[in-house]
Image (cartoon, rainbow, N blue to C red):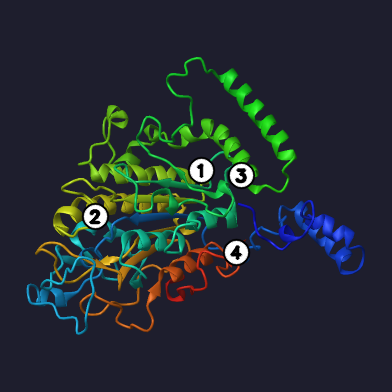
C-alpha cells in the first residue's frame, strides 16, 4: 500500500522528488538545502518523504534475534522465584480482589513445579529446567513486571509482535527492516522460523508488513527441511528447468515488470513485488549456503547438542526431539545473523495435538513446560555462548518473549491459567546491562509489585529500537491519516537495563 504522505496527496500526476521540489523552489533556502542534500546522497544518506529518520550517532546493536514462546510460558516456574508459593502451596488462593481468568483457573496456590537455584555472580534464581541459562545470567537483564492488555492468545500475541491487538499492523521485524535496511542484499532483512509443528495465533499476521512495503515482511524459514524456504527452487516435477532457462525466465520477468512499472511510477506495491522477485533470485545462491549447518565444526554442533551422524540432518524431525529442534533453529539464526540478516524471530510451542506440547499449560505444567523449557534453555544458552565467542553478542540484541504469563493459582491441580497481569521478558547482548533485574511482581507473581509503574510491550519495543539507534517516536509511516509507529502512542525506553 502506498505511503499516505503529504506529497502523495497533492493533486499532481506524480509526486515531486526531493530534488525536483528544491530545484523548482529556486534560490533562497531551497537552493542552499539542495547542495547539502546532494552531498548527503553521495555518501549514502538519501531519504525520500516516506523514508525513516536518520539514526542517532551510536547505536549499540546492529541486529536482533527474538525467541518467542507461543502460548504463554510460566514466569513462575522458570524465572520469577516466589518463595510464598512454596510456603502456601495447596492452600486456597486469595488475591484480595475479584479476579477474572480465562478458564476460571482459581484453584489453590501452586508452588513452582521445579526447584530454583542461584546462578552467576548476580545470584539470579532460575528454575532447574532452564539451568543451562545459568552460565549467562550475568549478561542478561530480566524484566519481571511486564504486562499485557489482553489475556486472549490471538490479541496478546499480536500486541507482542506488532504493538497492536488487532491485525493490519507491521511486525516488529518489519519496522526494523524499514528503519535500518539490509546488511546483505542476497538474504532477507527479516527472517522468521515458525514452530515446525504449526503456526502461532494469527499466523503470518505476526510478521506481515501490513501497510509498509512488502519487501519488509518476514521470510519464513524451516531449518532441517529438504526445502527450508518454500518455492525458492523449481519443484521436483519441473525437471525441464535448468540454470540457463531459469536465468532467461528471470530476465524476461524483470523486463516485463519494468515495462509495467514504467506506467505506474507511484505504485509502491509493484516496486516491492519486483524487489521480492529479485531477492528470491539472489537467495537461490546465498540461502542454501547460509542454512547448510553440516559445515559447522564438531565443537559447535556439540555446543548446540546437534553432534549426530550426518544422516540425521536429512531425517524428518520427530516431535519428541524438542531440544534438537529448537537448538537447530538457534544455530541457523546465528548463521543468518552472521551473514547480515537484521532480525531473526524464532518461535516455540505451536502444537495443538492431544496431549498437546505447547506453552499453554492449562492441564499440566510439568508435562508441557518440561521438554519445551529444557530445549529452549539449551538452544538459547548455546546461541548466547556462540555469539559471545565470535564477538557478535556485543552488537546483537537477544530478546526472550511470550504473550503473557500464567497464574499462581492452580487449574485442575497441575496446570495454570492465563495471566496477562504480569509476566517476564529478558534481554541480553547489544547495549544491555547484564546481571540485573528490573521491576518486581508481587509476592504471588500475580501483578506488578508497583502497580502504577509496570513495564509494557511498548516499553520493550521502544528499548529495542533505542538500542538499534532509532527513536521509537520518529520511526513512522503515514497510513489512513495517522503517523503509525510500532509503539502506537505509548512506550518509554527501559533505562535501568541499559549498559
Residue at 15% in and 78% down: 84
Residue projecting furthest to the top: 240
- Mark 2–mark 1 distance (CA, rounded to whole Å): 28 Å
Residue 11 has which mark?
A: none
Label 4 or label 1, whichever comes before in sequence order: 1
Residue at 23% in and 41% down: 321
Q: Is residue 30 left or right of residue 190?
A: right
Label 4 or label 2, whichever comes before in sequence order: 2
Q: From the viewer's perspective, is residue 135 above or below residue 189?
A: below
Residue 373 has which mark?
A: 2
Tell which tag, 2 or 3, sits nearer the viewer. 3
Tell which tag, 2 or 1, sits nearer the viewer. 2
> Would you name the residue on which mark 3 appears?
272
Label 3 or label 4, whichever comes before in sequence order: 3
Contact, CB < 8 Å: mark 2 with mark 3? no
> Would you name the residue on which mark 1 appears?
339
Tell which tag, 3 or 1, sits nearer the viewer. 3
Query: SS of the residue at dot 1?
Result: loop
Amino acid at each position: 500500500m502506498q505511503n499516505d504522505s503529504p506529497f502523495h496527496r497533492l493533486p499532481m500526476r506524480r509526486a515531486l522528488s526531493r530534488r525536483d521540489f528544491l530545484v523548482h523552489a529556486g534560490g533562497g533556502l531551497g537552493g542552499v538545502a539542495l547542495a547539502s542534500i546532494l552531498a548527503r546522497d553521495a555518501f549514502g544518506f538519501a531519504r525520500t518523504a516516506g523514508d525513516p529518520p536518520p539514526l542517532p550517532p551510536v547505536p549499540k546493536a546492529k541486529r536482533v534475534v527474538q525467541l518467542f514462546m507461543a502460548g504463554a510460558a510460566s514466569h513462575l516456574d522458570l524465572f520469577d522465584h516466589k518463595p510464598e508459593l512454596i510456603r502456601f502451596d495447596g492452600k486456597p488462593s486469595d488475591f484480595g480482589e475479584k479476579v477474572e481468568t480465562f478458564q476460571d483457573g482459581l484453584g489453590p496456590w501452586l508452588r513452582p513445579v521445579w526447584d530454583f537455584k542461584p546462578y552467576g555472580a548476580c545470584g539470579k534464581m532460575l528454575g532447574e529446567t532452564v539451568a543451562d541459562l545459568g552460565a549467562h545470567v550475568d549478561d542478561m537483564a530480566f524484566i519481571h513486571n511486564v504486562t499485557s492488555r489482553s489475556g486472549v492468545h490471538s490479541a496478546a500475541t499480536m500486541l507482542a509482535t506488532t504493538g497492536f491487538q488487532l491485525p493490519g499492523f507491521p511486525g516488529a521485524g518489519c519496522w526494523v527492516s524499514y528503519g535500518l535496511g539490509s546488511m546483505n542484499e542476497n538474504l532477507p532483512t527479516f527472517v522468521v522460523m515458525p514452530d515446525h509443528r504449526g503456526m502461532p495465533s494469527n499466523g503470518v499476521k505476526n510478521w506481515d508488513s501490513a501497510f509498509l512495503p512488502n519487501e519488509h515482511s518476514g521470510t519464513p524459514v524451516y531449518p532441517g527441511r529438504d526445502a527450508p524456504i518454500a518455492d525458492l527452487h523449481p519443484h521436483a516435477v519441473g525437471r525441464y528447468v535448468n540454470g540457463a532457462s531459469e536465468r532467461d525466465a528471470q530476465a524476461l520477468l524483470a523486463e516485463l515488470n519494468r515495462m509495467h512499472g514504467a506506467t505506474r511510477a507511484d505504485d509502491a506495491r509493484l516496486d516491492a513485488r519486483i524487489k521480492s522477485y529479485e531477492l528470491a533470485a539472489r537467495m537461490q545462491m546465498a540461502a542454501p549456503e547460509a542454512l547448510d549447518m553440516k559445515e559447522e565444526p564438531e565443537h559447535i554442533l556439540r555446543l548446540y547438542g546437534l553432534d549426530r551422524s550426518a544422516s540425521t540432518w536429512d531425517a524428518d524431525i520427530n516431535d519428541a526431539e524438542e531440544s534438537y529442534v529448537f537448538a537447530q533453529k538457534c544455530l541457523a539464526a546465528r548463521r543468518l545473523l552472521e551473514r547480515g540478516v537484521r532480525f531473526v524471530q524464532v518461535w516455540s510451542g505451536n502444537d495443538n495435538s492431544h496431549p498437546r506440547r505447547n506453552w499453554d499449560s492449562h492441564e499440566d505444567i510439568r508435562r508441557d513446560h518440561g521438554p519445551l523449557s529444557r530445549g529452549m534453555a539449551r538452544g538459547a544458552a548455546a546461541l548466547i555462548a556462540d555469539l559471545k565467542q565470535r564477538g557478535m553478542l556485543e552488537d546483537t540484541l537477544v530478546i526472550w518473549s511470550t504473550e503473557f504469563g500464567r497464574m499462581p493459582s492452580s487449574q485442575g491441580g497441575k496446570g495454570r491459567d492465563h495471566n496477562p497481569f504480569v509476566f517476564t521478558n529478558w534481554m541480553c547482548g547489544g547495549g544491555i546491562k547484564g546481571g540485573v533485574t528490573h521491576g518486581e511482581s508481587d509476592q504471588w507473581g500475580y501483578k506488578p509489585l508497583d502497580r502504577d509503574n509496570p513495564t509494557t510491550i511498548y516499553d520493550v519495543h521502544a528499548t529495542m529500537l533505542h538500542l538499534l539507534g532509532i527513536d521509537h517516536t520518529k520511526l513512522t509511516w503515514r497510513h489512513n491519516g495517522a503517523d503509525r509507529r510500532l509503539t502506537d502512542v505509548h512506550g518509554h525506553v527501559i533505562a535501568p537495563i541499559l549498559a
